[in-house]
Image: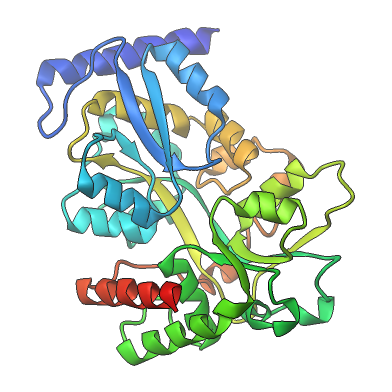
Amino acid sequence: MKKRVIYLIVAAMLVSAVTIVGLTGCGSSGSGESINVFNWGEYIDEDLIDEFESETGIKVNYNTAATCEEMYAKMKNGGVNYDIVVPSDYMVSRMIEEDMVTPIDFNNVPNAKYIDADFQKPEYDPTGEYSVPYQWGRVGIIYNKDMVDEKDIGSWDLLWNKKYSGEILMFDNSRDAMGIALKRLGASYNTTDEATLKQAAELLKEQKPLVQAYVMDQIFDKMESGEAAIAPYYVGDYFLMLDELEGDDSINLGYYIPKEGTNLYVDAMCIPKDCQNKSGAEAFINFLLDPENMAQNTEFISYSTAETAARDLLDDDMKNNAEMYPSHDVIASCETYVNLPANIRELYDSLWVDIMSS
């Protein structure tokens, strides 16, 4: 109870302070106002939203996107002013480059001190001004152990195995789908070589007749029901599926990181340039970075936290899970997406349209 009272006082002080100094670029907040949050589906413990609203009096309007590209398009097209968005690393970099996000006032986010050094001033935000890490993880392949022969696993090749035609799901976004094809070719996720990108697109065209559906959040229903047998996806969602299937022996899922290598991603919280309530956004970010709240959120969504103080509060099975918290050597072997030049992004869009229409 004491913690809640103290937080309420601090949040109120932050709101008052911001109002007095008169922030530019974003609207300031007063008591009883709201914030608009744009995040991914199934990516927050909603009890934390209720707790934040109770403590601060700030209402959270929570919206979701299926892909970074959808998030970017909605921000560009306007219509809704978001106060917090949670894009992935490469999209954070693009939003910084296009002046779509504003620097965070870390005087209002003291809990940023808990962010591990490995996640401070990352490549996608080299000054560390525009983002704070929300969760991170890796991409691998989820498969149904009763539908897939164990001798077939280990590589990205599984997604092109004709034996499983009609039982394969694929990412419904160009960056992840193209990235898998690039890794299968032995290329970098971040290549700007047009010939290599076109070769990756041809691989995805070859794969298309085998694909049951291109999905994002729909993966949960399809894999948990046994409707599909194979899907590339994020490691945190594999563990979330296991939680949701607990007690159901009819579905037996496995997961592996392909031998060719994979993507290590970071989803980060940012404040858009046209936000309406910057102080409220900073209060919510600070609330989520509190180690107890971060641990609660991490346990709920089954991704990986960038705070050792929060990880220490997790149950032993989760904090010692080598898939969720791999060794430094394993992390070093992964590749992170970077923002690509405009002409390459345009090529991606063109190739993706061609793949989907083929």
List the single residue furthest toward the front. Answer: 357
Q: Is residue 307 left or right of residue 98?
A: right
Residue 295 locus on image (x, y percent): 59, 35
**295 lies above or below 219:** above
What kind of colouring is applied to the model shown?
A: rainbow
**102 lies above or below 23:** below
If the image is split into quadrants, where does the C terminus sit?
bottom left
Q: Is residue 231 left or right of residue 102?
A: right
Residue 84 locus on image (x, y percent): 33, 36
Q: Residue at x 70, y 69 (%)?
A: 167
Q: Kindly tell me whether residue 120 is visible in this rendering.
A: yes
- The residue nearer to you, when weighing 125 against 235, is 235
Q: Residue at x 56, y 28 (%)?
A: 292
Residue 273 locus on image (x, y percent): 18, 40
Q: Residue at x 55, y 72 (%)?
A: 262
If the image is split into quadrants, where does the N terminus sit?
top right
Q: Kindly tell me whether residue 126 is visible in this rendering.
A: no
**131 lies above or below 90:** above
**134 lies above or below 290:** below
Q: Residue at x 57, y 49 (%)?
A: 304
List the single residue furthest toward the right. Answer: 249
Q: Quadrant of residue 279?
A: top left
Residue 109 locus on image (x, y percent): 33, 31
- In this figure, what is the number of numbered marks? 0
